[in-house]
Image: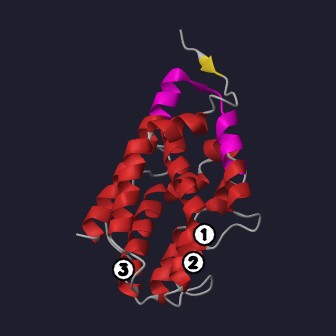
Amino acid sequence: MTTTITATVSESLSKRLKGLTHETHDRLDKSIMAATSFVSVEGYARFAGVQYLFHRDIHALYDDAALQALLPGLAERRRMDLIAGDLHDLGTALPEGGDPAFVAGSIDVPTALGWLYVAEGSNMGAALLRREAAKLGLSDTKGARHLTPAPEGPVAHWRAFTAALDAAQLTEEDEARAVAGANAAFARVQSYADAAFA
């Protein structure tokens, strides 16, 4: 028998994802910081390339009807084209990688929720990164578009996303796939970072 989990304030899915992905998330943060990506435009371009590959991986998720039903406004949250514009501003070719992690028509919703949790969570740190990018002469209109905060602000933007995520009715098996998806997303970005900053 499958049990449906009702999210509560103290045991919300977003809080469980945060706790159960802490190790992979922390490792990635340390790698990005150690790479000193924001010391030069060249370093920043490598960082933006990592971002591009990850958002290319998840680009198909933003058009998925099942995910859009669970996460209102999902389509407006996509950032791949903004990152591509930033790389163009920097005179950097779009990086090439393997096949995207998701393609239309074969998307497992719980797994995808974990990946989107990682993508949306990265917006929370974008305010700090935006200030660092500004020191390199980059802005919301040149080179750092993808770091521009949502009109309502990053905290409100994140809370709207996590409220929708936490409202999703998931079974225990679904939740396990969401956690696995989030860890896989962090690991995927880690692999891109390792290659970019080697």
Mark 1 or mark 3: which comes first in sequence? Answer: 3
Alpha carbon separation for disc pair 1 and 3: 18 Å
Q: Residue at x 62, y 86 (%)?
A: 141
Side (left or right) of 144 relative to 155: left
Q: Are marks 2 and 1 in contact (CB under 8 Å)?
A: yes
Does 145 sit above or below residue 122?
below
Q: Which residue is mark 2?
A: 131
Q: Is residue 70 visible?
A: no
What's the mark number on residue 43?
3
On the image, numbered disc 1 is attached to which residue? 127
Q: Earlier in the sequence, mark 2 or mark 3?
A: 3
Disc 2 marks a residue whose amino acid type is: Arg
- Residue at x 51% of width, y 81% of height: 133
Magenta residues?
A: 160-178
Across and down, in percent, residue 54 comes to 43, 61
Residue 97 lies within the magenta run: no
Circle 3 SS class: helix
In this view of the protein, which residue sits in the foreground, 109 or 22?
22
Marks 2, 3: nearer the viewer: 2
Q: Is residue 43 above or below residue 18?
A: below
Q: Is residue 161 magenta?
A: yes
Quarter of the picture holding the C terminus: bottom left
Secondary element at image label 2: helix
Q: Secondary structure at mark 1?
A: helix
Residue type highlighted by circle 1: Ala
Coloring applied to the structure: secondary structure
Q: Is residue 169 above or below residue 191?
A: above
